Structure formats: C-alpha cells, structure tokens
Image (cartoon, grey):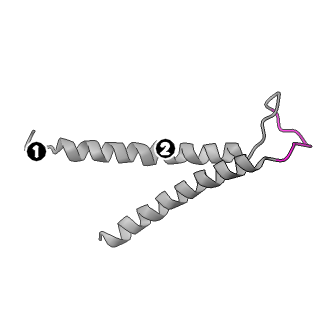
Amino acid sequence: MNSWINLDALWRIAVVGLLTGAGLPALFAIGVRALNPPTGDGEAAAGRPAVGPLRYTVAGLCFAVVLAAIGWGIYVIVNHS
C-alpha cells in the first residue's frame, strides 16, 4: 500500500460514485418505462391500454429507492459537516 494513496478508500469512492451516478438514473428510467405500456411499433398510441398493477408496483419501488437514496445523501451531507 502506498502511503500517499489509500487504495481501499479510492475503491469505495469509485463504487459509490458509480452506483449513485449511473445506477440511480438507470433505476429511475426503469420506473418511468414501467409506467408506459408496450406498443407493437414503438409509437405512442392514442388509446393505449391501462398499465397493470405489477407495473405500478415496480415503478413505485424504483421511485422509492431513488427517493430513499436522495434522502440518505442529504442526511449524510447535513450530519457530517
């Protein structure tokens, strides 16, 4: 281990940054996609069928995880100053 660079801390920061920087927006996109019913041609239709309860549950869980991560981030920033 180098005395100038703490590799353990560097890896932790990289993993957390990757998860929050790429994982949370991807999870939010999955939630948004779950609320839109699939179409055959990829175009939005005027009379689309209603979204099922499973899709609402998946979207709600995705949004809840994203909101929890945002709340946790605010908590960490406020309490570690």
In the figure, is residue 49 to the left or right of 29? right
Farthest residue, direction front: 54
Tell me the number on the disc at residue 71: none
Asked which secondary structure carries label 2, the reply is helix
Q: Residue at x 50, y 60 (%)?
A: 68
Relative image position of residue 79 (x, y in whole percent):
33, 72
Q: Position of residue 36 (x, y in %)?
A: 75, 44
Toward which corner of the image does residue 63 lie, by quadrant? bottom right
As rendered, which of 59 and 7 lies closer to the eye?
59
Mark 1 or 2, closer to the camera: 2
Disc 1 marks which residue? 4
Horizontal and vertical percent position of residue 14: 32, 43
C-alpha span from label 1 to label 2? 30 Å
Magenta segment includes 61: no
Amino acid beneath label 1: Trp
- The N terminus, quarter of image: top left
Left or right side of 20 for 9: left
Q: Residue at x 36, y 65 (%)?
A: 76
Q: Which residue is mark 2?
A: 23
Q: Main secondary structure of the magenta part?
A: loop
Q: Amino acid at mark 2?
A: Gly
> Relative to 57, does residue 37 appear above or below in the rendering?
above
Q: Vertical placement of 71 versus 6: above or below?
A: below
Instruction: Read off the magenta span.
Output: 43-50
Mark 1 or mark 2: name the one nearer the start of the chain.
1
Residue found 61% across the figure and 44% down from its top? 29
